[in-house]
Amino acid sequence: MQIDSNEFANQVVLVTGAGSGIGAATAKLFAKRGAKVAVTDINLVSAQKTAAEINNTGGNAIAILHDVSNMTHWENVRDEIHAKLGELNVVHNNAFMKIEKSTNETTIAEWEKQISVNLVSMQMSVLTFLTDLKKNHGAIVNTSSIHANFGFVHHGAYAASKGGMVAFGRQLAVDYGPEIRVNTVLPGPILTPIWDDTTDEYRNLVTSNTPLRRMGKPEEVAEAVCFLASSRASYISGTTLTVDGGYTAEKA
């Protein structure tokens, strides 16, 4: 199927955690296909860099400081989007936080912060943009993780939050269909800045355990997100799409 380079023309898209990695790649792809993009991140400089790259290549983007665990920030984001871009069509809940610790060493504050950033932020996105999304028959796409379905050492709170995202995404699809479609992507080993502190040996081990024998690119997850947000996925809602090069297929 040939993809229309203007398939998101006249649509307004919010991508959280878009200063780097999957979020940055997705924001750029939405813009390349015609969307006006709100690039938000807790690191404003990173968000501004992504927005500048979009604008310098003929796109339309704004950068906004955004702590997704803070409802006031969500309200500020809404007001700025409405003032500068218009009503929202698509939300990509992508921002995340991960603290790698054994469960017994994870403090309640660390647990609650990961749950808040990764999962409660989805509720905040709905509270903030439900009116826009229902009016525009919009889409929500969430970035969960293969951690939702498989256990990895020292990822207790992260796994709980990512599993919750899958369950909550299904629930939102039930609650708000037919006006809003809601889907979730589950990335596997994707080469984003979070891998910068890992060793070549570990990355090679992950690669050897992946049927496609390589790590994924943020742009490959971005393609999945844009597909789920587009009219090409008009009869897809309440489901998950795993983007992991077959990594979890070997574990099944």
Image: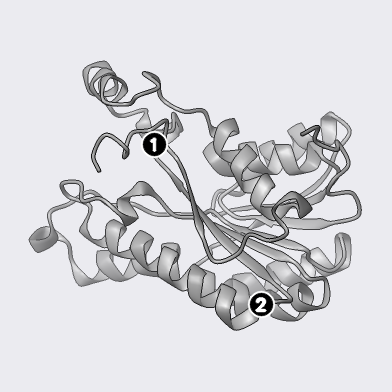
Amino acid type, mark 2 = Gly
Residue 20 appearing in the image? no
Q: Quadrant of the C terminus?
A: top left
Disc 1 versus disc 2: nearer the observer: 2
Crowd band around label 2 with a 10 angstrom C-alpha radius: few (<14), some (14–19), many (20+): some
Above or below, 16 relative to 124: above
Label annotation for residue 177: 2
Looking at the rendered structure, the kind of residue marked 1 is Ile
Q: Which residue is mark 1?
A: 194
Q: Residue at x 15, y 46 (%)?
A: 153
Asked if 103 appears above or below 50 in the picture, the reply is: below
Q: Position of residue 30 (x, y in %)?
A: 75, 43
Q: In this view of the protein, can residue 190 be seen by the observer?
A: yes
Which residue occupies 82% across, 77% down?
135
Q: Is residue 170 above or below residue 144?
A: below
- Of callouts 1 and 2, which one flags the residue occurring earlier in the amino acid sequence? 2
